[in-house]
Amino acid sequence: MEKAYKLLAKQENISNNEAKDLIDAGLVSAKGQILPVARAEMSENTKFSVQKVAKPAIVFENDDILVVNKPPFFVSEKLEKIFKFKLLNRLDKETSGIVLLYKNEEFKERAIKEFKNMRVKKTYIAIVQGIVSEEMEFYEPILTIKGKTGAFSRISPRGKSAITRIFPLMISGKKSLVKIEIDTGRTHQIRVHLSNAGFGIIGDEKYAKNSSKRMFLHAYELELLDLKFRAKIPNDFNVFGFEIGKEI
């Protein structure tokens, strides 16, 4: 028996730290199951499957801002190292889509004011469990607790206000493709509201308690200071019988 990350490092001819990062990102599986812990003891004959991560793509750039389409399994903070600018917003590691990086302090201050005053329009696309046949709105306040293993959010009267709107797009079997608009940006807001309503996002292991090759949540559009950005929907959303074009 040997620790999983050491076995993976040997198999892929990479360093132990690189192997740990791959496992922590949820990109490594064995016997059809994603490895949850890098230090898990495993047989030395174990064969690993490693999912490749796409590269972030530039959506828009000017003297003030850089807009990037972040792939899933990619930590937002890594964008700062790649592009040498600072983040204006973040997405969960599992979520793909629009991330903003600012180039100067003047624009940063203007943008932050827009976020605080809820004048930034954010639209997401998701594949969820269940049949969504009509528009819905959720207003339950969300409380976030941050610990050593990361943040966890839940519905609570002691939480902060949160507004989420859901619009049905397509239905396939017992799954739905939906458009989501949020006015607030609480931690894991969409994931918590949808899971609480019985429409958990496919691949959301933390809140919906289901696994998939990825979490099917994509930050599709963002409008800020008379600018509108769109990150095309990933090809891997064309599963479960959905036929999605580049735009919705």
Image (cartoon, rainbow, N blue to C red):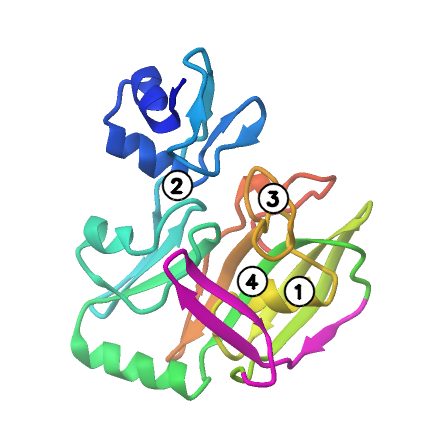
The answer to whether residue 12 is above or below residue 60 is: above
Mark 2 — residue?
A: 24
1 or 3: tag closer to the N-terminus: 1
Task: Give the label, 1 or 3, closer to the camera.
Answer: 1
Nearer the N terminus, badge 1 or badge 2? 2
Q: Which residues are magenta?
A: 134-158
For discs 3 and 2, the disc positioned in front in the rendered view: 2
Q: Which corner quadrant holds the N terminus?
A: top left
The quadrant in which residue 227 appears is bottom left
Residue at 43% across, 37% down: 37
Q: Amino acid at mark 1?
A: Leu
Q: On the image, numbered disc 3 is attached to which residue?
A: 237
Using residue 107 as the reference point, say whether residue 46 is left or right of it: right
Magenta stretch contains residue 107: no
Q: Position of residue 66 (x, y in %)?
A: 28, 61
Secondary structure under badge 4? Answer: strand
Q: Which residue is mark 1?
A: 194
Spot occupied by residue 38 in the image (x, y as percentages of width and height): 38, 34
User: Looking at the image, which residue is at 51% across and 59% down?
Assistant: 220
Query: Which residue is labeled 4 in the image?
Result: 124
- Image quadrant where one finds the C terminus: bottom right
